[in-house]
Image (cartoon, rainbow, N blue to C red):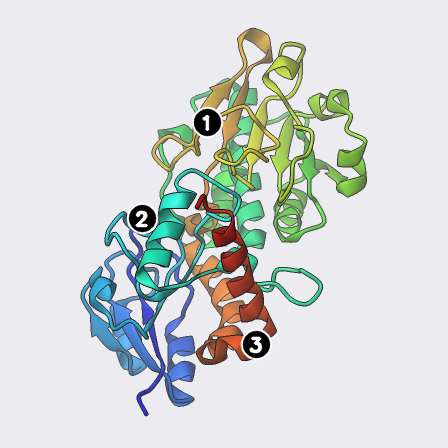
Amino acid sequence: MSKFTIWLRDEYRKTERRTPLLPSGAKELIDIGYNVVVERSDKRIFPDSDYEAAGCKMAAPGSWRDAPADFTILGLKELPHDPAVLKNNHIYFAHAFKHQNGWQDLLGRFQNGGGHLLDLEYMVDGAGRRVVAFGYWAGYMGAALALMQWYDKAAGRKSLIEKGLTPWDNAGLLDEDIRARKADGPSPKVLIIGAGGRSGRGARELLARHGAEVTCWGRAETEQLDRDAILDHDILINCVFVSSSIPPFVRLQDLDRNKRLSVISDVSCDPLSSYNPLPLYAEPTSWDHPVVKAGVNGGAIDLIAIDNLPSLLPREASQEFAGLLLPYLKAVDKLEANPVWRAALGAYETACDSLPS
């Protein structure tokens, strides 16, 4: 009987340095009888040599396309547009189950090829809680970027982050850059919506360490939405995971009366979904262009909406996420026997049911 194989692909996105599988985790999988193939990568935060030392078989970047159909392909972010059909099971964040842009084409590729999409976002326990997420570091980095942008605006100087972003080697160096931007004067008043979740906790802890005044909102406050209260903050950080239609937090017409709100960091970053609670922009911002303007005249705000924030701290983010995922990878060879994998498979099947016939 052949060994079950997990194939870690090189990320298609050029700026993605995170990994869902550490070299130490790969060794644990090998030790329990898995076969682990790792594509070589010149951007992954952990070097190829660490995976080779762990006993992994190495492969060329992108060669997963030719992997046998019974191999499970592991990654983080989007697949390239080829091949036209997907014969393998793939584990990654697809952003397709809420009818985001291109969802029909992607699911059609799986259906036509016979593979299945096991979306990391839909790995949930019996109570519907996600069991693996980068949320903490997304909130952490979203708050850090917003804080630096606000400091620069308040000081009337050129924005550091608008020069373009590159990853920080560690969180200590990020702290140094934040402190270097801070000038004399009052600290910003920051509203975190979704403050009780993983992303909210990351944002709270970053802001507390740097002395910001923080207001925390949860479900109760968004159900009785007070947009004037939102506008009475210097920074808004959105950390809400939205899976159904809710009233927008801030609309373009609200910015017409804005006198204070200066920076929004949309950590959740789902502009291509009809559920987007911040309908102020049409597509995510990027590392090259992290900030866009929304609104006009005196009420305009700077908006940061980067959809791979944790990759700006790739080492810490990978260590946390891969640690959470590893126990489930040890059970992925028996999908139907594990309730979390059954949930992910069920989410895929439900999404496929909504494809037009």
Q: Position of residue 341 (x, y in %)?
A: 53, 70
Q: Secondary structure at mark 1?
A: loop
Residue located 55% across and 40% down the image: 267
Amino acid type of the residue tagged 1 in the rendering? Ala
Which sits in the foreground, 80 or 32?
80
Determine whether 35 is above or below 96 in the image. below
Above-or-below relation of 101 to 171:
above
Q: Mark 1 or mark 2, which has the lower sequence index?
A: 2
Q: Is residue 295 visible?
A: yes
Give the residue type that dot 2 points to.
Answer: Arg
Q: Which residue is mark 2?
A: 13
Asked whether the residues under the numbered discs 1 and 3 touch, taking CB atoms below 8 Å apart as contact, a structural biologist would say: no
Q: Position of residue 11 (x, y in %)?
A: 31, 56
Q: Is residue 18 left or right of residue 303?
A: left
Where residue 282 is drawn, which disc sits there?
A: 1
Image disc number at residue 274: none
Residue with the mark numbered 3: 338
Write down the quadrant of residue 105 in the picture: top left
Question: What residue appears at the point 51 percent right and 47 percent down from the top-left corner?
Answer: 354
| 125 lies left or right of 282 | right
